[in-house]
């Protein structure tokens, strides 16, 4: 009894240790326990159960133009090298030498003929095969089989329209099935009918926050009016653009979602009523986004998707941003550290002037110096920090209940489903609900069997 | 290092810099005083006065740096036209300054406390009214209770003489970090 009283006073509940991931997420009331943003053991588990199983974004094919071109990335906290091998196939090698564990590549990008370990000189082909061992005959004297000591690789590497993903889990479904229609729509919102090429230069910077808070923010159309008030007030952004009333949400299996503004009927009609030259002026004011007004885009995105100007997240951590010109990866680097990696794209066939506009817009909006983004980091930093404060973290869950129970999922004859509503937190709550499913599943077959289907009816 | 030739009849070397020690000292002094005064304005958060220190065609640019192998160092920095952390003209710098002044600019409210250190100042070329200057810098920032960030690097500036005063016509900022260890870049370098 005394023990129970002590637990109560210190805020530790008897069941604390036995809690399941789903105990942290109260889907019905839209509440999320703060502990998931700070707990070391939960974070370690995320690296295994989420990043270790998911399809993780590696790079775009245009970043690996030639045999030997490589780009370094992470799966969870494991550093990997995406590299084009001699057959032209993209391989994802785990950057650790099987001999003593040293890394075999220290540059973040470049071109190489092979990866030679700087410790004892084991040399690996672009596909990971061990092709050179100093002293193979003299010292190993036949005791080392080279074919057994190639570099470890991701279980599968697949692309969707030029975007390369990899997974460590051989049981994962294929990328196409993993993405489902919402994930694919998310990537197609990059304008995939164009010939996209990555602009050289990935902005990387470190925010002292939990990665999930950075992810849930990408769905957040509630914050711009406040967080980004100075960008609006200084005349840099149109308030209507950052705080649009009409919203549309699409929720997909395994946690993918698209959430944000919807092109309204009125806007559509206004656009249709314009002359060609006026329409061109509108497109020119949206650098890199004129693709959205083409017939092929309408076909690729579908009747619902074409109306979305929202932000997709490819679960777990890939934000498809700003009208098909940028991707932002939220790379976990510890429970309270996240790196943001911005990839920028242009249509290879666009006029140079247009490309230049896209690049400048990307630098001015986002990235650490971006007039929008510079005001985000401290919020996430402090949200993470207060979750560590023992009293609050134990007692007060965070509120993700905006719109909860008040909206309906409608299904279009095309099969695409969505919620059309005002600003809401459906996608954020979906993210955390999916998070619990991923964390609770023992393996991929269990996740496939037990994950929530796309919601229907009232949500 | 190139040694200026004594026998050179002209008063300027091929970089356009003055030959005589007196003229060099004078130039060095003028350049340094300009940079120090500019740094003081920034640390005192007198940003609109700082804008007056810029020419209308200023290019303020910070490329992205990448870890490359020694033989690939030509690809270490992104080039103009590729992605960058800053790629600003005067209009955008003015917008940055305006943003800090209109209220609710959270990244600078409460204001950061900054200190600019400018060292190793070297005029490296002079053509017409333009003096190209290289300098090292350390920008220290602390915010709120105990947030701390610091950036070190090299600046290549072009100072232009406009009616007998220097104005900043170009600032290219080369950081040492590849992954920025700071949550944002809300300060002026
Ligand atoms: S650790 Fe790589 S060769 Fe020994
Ligand atoms: Fe934001």
Image: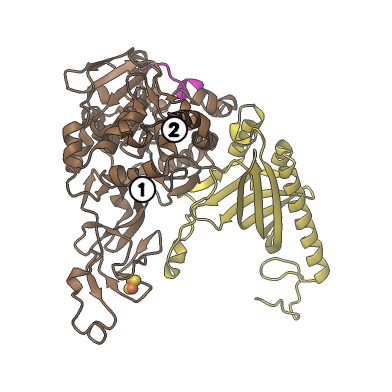
Q: Are labels 1 and 2 assigned to the same chain?
A: yes
Q: Colour of chain A?
A: brown
Ligand 2 contact, mark 1 (Cβ < 8 Å) = no
User: Which quadrant holds the C terminus of chain A?
Assistant: top left
Q: Position of residue B124 (x, y in %)?
A: 67, 64
Quadrant containing the N terminus of chain A in the rendered view: top left
Q: Which mark is residue A114?
A: none
Identify the residue position indicated by label 2 in the image.
Answer: A3
State the residue at coordinates (41%, 30%).
A13
> Which one is nearer the viewer's eye here, A248 or A305?
A248
User: Is residue A182 shown above or below A414?
Assistant: below
Task: Please give the residue where the numbered disc 1 appears in the rendered image.
Answer: A198
Indicate which label's residue lies in the foreground, 1 or 2: 2
Image coordinates of residue A235 in percent, x first then y, are 57, 26
Mark 2 Cα within 10 Å, few/some/many (few <14, many 20+)?
Answer: few
Q: Residues within 10 Å of mark 1 (few under 14, many from 20)?
A: many
Q: Earlier in the sequence, mark 1 or mark 2?
A: 2
Q: Residue at x 27, y 29 (%)?
A: A294
Q: Which residues are magenta?
A: A239-246
Say above or below: A54 vs A253.
below
Q: Is mark 2 within 8 Å of ligand 2?
A: no
Q: Colour of chain B?
A: yellow
Decide whether residue A245 is among the magenta residues.
yes
Q: Disc 1 versus disc 2: distance between alpha carbons?
A: 60 Å
Image coordinates of residue B177 in percent, x first then y, are 53, 56
Q: Is any atom of residue A167 visible in this view? A: yes
């Amino acid at each position: 009894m005394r023990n129970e009283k002590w637990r109560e006073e210190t805020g530790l509940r008897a069941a604390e240790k036995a809690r399941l991931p789903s105990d942290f997420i109260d889907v019905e009331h839209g509440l999320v326990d703060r502990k998931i943003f700070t707990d070391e053991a939960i974070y370690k588990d995320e690296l295994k159960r989420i990043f270790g199983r998911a399809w993780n974004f590696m790079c775009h094919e245009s970043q690996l133009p030639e045999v030997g071109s490589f780009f370094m990335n992470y799966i969870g906290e494991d550093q990997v090298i995406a590299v084009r091998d001699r057959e032209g196939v993209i391989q994802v090698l785990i950057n650790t030498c099987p001999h003593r564990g040293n890394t075999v590549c220290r540059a973040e990008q470049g071109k190489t003929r092979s990866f030679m370990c700087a410790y004892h000189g084991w040399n690996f082909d672009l596909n990971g095969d061990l092709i050179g061992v100093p002293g193979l005959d003299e010292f190993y004297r036949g005791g080392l089989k080279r074919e057994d000591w190639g570099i470890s690789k991701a279980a599968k590497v697949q692309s969707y329209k030029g975007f390369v993903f990899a997974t460590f889990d051989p049981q994962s479904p294929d990328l196409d099935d993993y993405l489902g229609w919402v994930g694919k729509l998310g990537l197609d919102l990059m304008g995939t009918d164009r010939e996209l090429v990555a602009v050289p230069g990935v902005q990387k910077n470190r925010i002292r926050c939990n990665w999930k808070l950075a992810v849930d923010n990408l769905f957040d159309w509630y914050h711009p009016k406040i967080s980004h008030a100075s960008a609006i007030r200084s005349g840099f952004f149109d308030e209507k653009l950052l705080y649009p009333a009409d919203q549309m949400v699409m929720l997909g299996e395994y946690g993918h979602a698209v959430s944000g503004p919807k092109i309204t009927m009125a806007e559509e009609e206004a656009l249709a009523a314009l002359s060609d030259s006026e329409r061109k002026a509108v497109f020119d004011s949206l650098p890199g986004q004129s693709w959205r007004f083409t017939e092929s885009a309408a076909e690729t995105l579908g009747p619902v998707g074409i109306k979305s100007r929202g932000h997709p997240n490819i679960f777990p951590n890939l934000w498809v941003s700003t009208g098909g010109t940028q991707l932002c990866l939220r790379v976990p680097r510890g429970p309270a550290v996240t790196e943001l990696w911005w990839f920028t794209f242009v249509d290879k066939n666009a006029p140079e002037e247009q490309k230049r506009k896209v690049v400048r817009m990307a630098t001015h909006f986002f990235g650490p110096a971006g007039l929008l983004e510079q005001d985000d980091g401290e919020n996430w930093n402090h949200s993470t920090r207060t979750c560590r404060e023992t009293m609050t973290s134990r007692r007060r869950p965070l509120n993700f209940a905006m719109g909860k129970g008040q909206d309906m999922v409608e299904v279009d004859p095309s099969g695409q489903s969505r919620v059309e509503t005002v600003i809401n937190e459906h996608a954020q709550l979906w993210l955390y609900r999916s998070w619990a499913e991923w964390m609770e599943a023992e393996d991929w077959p269990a996740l496939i069997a037990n994950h929530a289907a796309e919601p229907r009816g009232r949500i | 290092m190139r040694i200026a030739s004594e026998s050179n009849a002209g008063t300027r070397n091929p970089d356009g810099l003055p030959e005589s020690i007196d003229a060099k000292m004078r130039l060095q002094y003028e350049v340094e005083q300009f940079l120090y005064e500019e740094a003081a304005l920034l640390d005192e958060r007198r940003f609109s006065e700082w804008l007056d220190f810029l020419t209308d065609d200023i290019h303020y640019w910070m490329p992205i740096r990448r870890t490359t192998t020694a033989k690939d160092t030509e690809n270490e920095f992104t080039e103009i036209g590729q992605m960058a952390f800053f790629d600003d003209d005067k209009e955008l710098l003015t917008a940055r300054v305006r943003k800090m002044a209109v209220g609710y600019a959270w990244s600078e409210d409460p204001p950061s406390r900054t200190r600019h250190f400018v060292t190793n100042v070297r005029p490296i070329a002079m053509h017409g009214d333009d003096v190209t200057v290289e300098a090292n810098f350390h920008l220290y920032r602390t915010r709120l209770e105990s947030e701390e960030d610091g950036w070190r690097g090299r600046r290549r500036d072009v100072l232009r003489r406009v009616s007998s005063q220097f104005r900043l016509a170009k600032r290219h900022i080369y950081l040492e970090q590849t992954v920025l260890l700071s949550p944002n870049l809300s300060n002026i370098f």
